[in-house]
Every structure is written in C-alpha cells, then in structure tokens.
Amino acid sequence: MTSCAWRFLYQAALGRRLCLTYTAAMVAGRTRFSTFGAGASLCALSAMLAGLPACRRSDPPANTPVTVFVGAGMADALYELADRFQTETGTPVRISAAASGVLRRQLQAGAACDVFISADAFEMDAADRDGLIKPATRRPVAANTLVVVACAPDASAWQDLTPLDDPSTGKIAMGDPAYVPAGRYAKRALEAAGLWPRVQDRLVLADSVRVAAKYVELHQANVGLVYATDAARMADCTVVWQVPADASGEVAFPAAVCARSLSPHAEAFLTFIRSDSAGEVWSRWGFRRPKE
C-alpha cells in the first residue's frame, strides 16, 4: 500500500477514535453535544480530509482505453481505425455507435467519453454550446453524400426528387430529423424541393441511418434517403439519385475531444483518424475527405 493510502487510513482512524471517545462520554452521562460532540465530528471529518491533498492521481497507463462516441453511419470505418490505432500505439479504443443526437444526450447526462464524432455540425454545435467538448480540438474527419436508394428490381435513375411527390412511389424511409443527422440532411433536401409537407404521411422515420437503410432492404419502405456509404452495402438495391450538396447541405462529420476527458491519448487518436493512412480507410468505406 502506498504511503498516501497509509496516511489516509491513519487520519481516518484518528477521526474514528475521537468519535468513539465522544460515544463513551455519552454513555457515562457526560453529554455536551453543542461543544464536544460537534467538535469531535468536525475533527474526525477534518482529519480524514487532511489526508486527501497528498494523494495525487497518477497518469493513466498507455493501455488505458480511449472511449469514442461516433455516429452510426461511421461505425465500420471507426472499428477498423480503432484496431489500427491500437496496433500502432498499444492503446485500445472503445467504440459506442448510435445516432449523433442520442450520443450528445448521453454526454449531457454525464456519460464518460473521450472523443465525440458527430454526423453533422448541428449536434457538434449543440455539444459546444453545452460545454461538452473542447472547442480548440474540433476538426472535420470525413464527408459523405446523401442518396435516394430503392430495392425494387425495376428501379431506374431519377433526375431529381420529384418522383417522391407521386404517392405510387410508396413509403419513404429516413432518419428521424429530431436526432438523426441523416434525417436532417434528408429533410433539408425535401424542403428545398418543396416536398416536405407533401410526403409526411408516407415517411417511415428511423432511429439511425442504418435502420432506415434496413427498412428499405427488408421492403418495409419503398425508397430511402440514406448516405452513399450505407447504400453501397445494401443487397440488391440501386442508388436512383444522388442529392446535390446545395440541396442537402454539405454532409460533413466533425470530431472533438470531450470536455470531461482525462485521457492523454484522446488528441492522439483524433490526429490519427485525420492522417493520410486513415484517409485510405475512410475512402475504402466510401467516405470523402472533408473540406477544411
């Protein structure tokens, strides 16, 4: 046991002895609560706290994991990057993937996290306003494209989003814009086309972009507004339209170190996933380099 721990136990024992003395005095009928009792309690507490300043937290070892919260659509790329980072540095990485809005709410609730990677600027801006990230560490790490995907055998290319206005197109799957960034990109594109109020009764809202893609694959929706990276992994499905960035907004994914992070490896991981070698991984999973 360290000298710091022994010192703390000694001080605690001293406080306990004072309290026991007070108890014995009560049994003997010599109760003086307003003076001796309060003094004993304060002395005991002071004695215990006196041992704390000398106890210093040691630096985390190299193999202390880095905890990363990442938007669901980036999960596959991040798992591979995490493995590479551990191979190169010896530091393991724990990945928690979900809708970016869900992850931000977990941060607000006090969840332990070292790096937050959001699927849009909206959630990262909100995290910044709430003091959940270290603003100076914020960087873009990847970019994507919003597409319309269909799994019907006769699916053919579109020229724009106008076919969504036809009820015969069927149900439209997309992320819930309340907390799924892909859903916000989709809503923005539908608003730009003047279609948002006209398709409300045919929307199938999902709790992540991955779930929206799965709805289309399983024919629970006829078409879906998802990321190009998700569409590329959908079996027997066709991208019928690539939504221009001026309609959906630039699909960019920012990352930052979390404000409460104590990890000495968080910034190193953030630097790593923006490196040229990481760029090859992002590209293989269908992502593009972001605009700086």
Image (cartoon, rainbow, N blue to C red):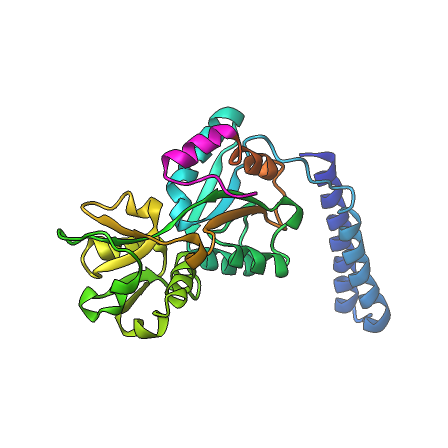
Of 62 and 265, which appears nearest the observer? 265
Say if 226 sits above or below 276 in the image. Answer: below
Residue 65 location in percent, x, y?
Answer: 52, 37
Examine the rendering and report whether any part of residue 256 can be seen.
Answer: yes
For this orientation, the residue located farthest to the left is 153
Q: Is residue 219 left or right of residue 68?
A: left
Residue 127: x and y in percent read 58, 57
Q: Position of residue 261 (x, y in %)?
A: 61, 46
| Residue extending farthest top | 88
Residue closest to the eye, 118 or 91: 118
The quadrant of the rendering that contains the N terminus is top right
x and y percentages locating residue 170 in the rendered image? 20, 66
Q: Is residue 219 left or right of residue 136?
A: left
- The residue lying at 27 percent from left, 43 percent from top is 233
Residue at 40% across, 56% down: 182
Q: Residue at x 28, y 74 (%)?
A: 201
Q: Is residue 135 magenta?
A: no
The answer, for residue 130, to whether it is visible in the render is no
Q: Residue 26's image quarter? A: bottom right
Residue placed farthest to the right in the image?
A: 35
Q: Which residues are magenta?
A: 276-292
Locate residue 224: give its quadrant. Answer: bottom left
Foreground of the two, 42 or 163 = 163
Left or right placement of residue 275 versus residue 53 in this view: left
The residue depicted at 48 percent of the width and 28 percent of the height is: 277
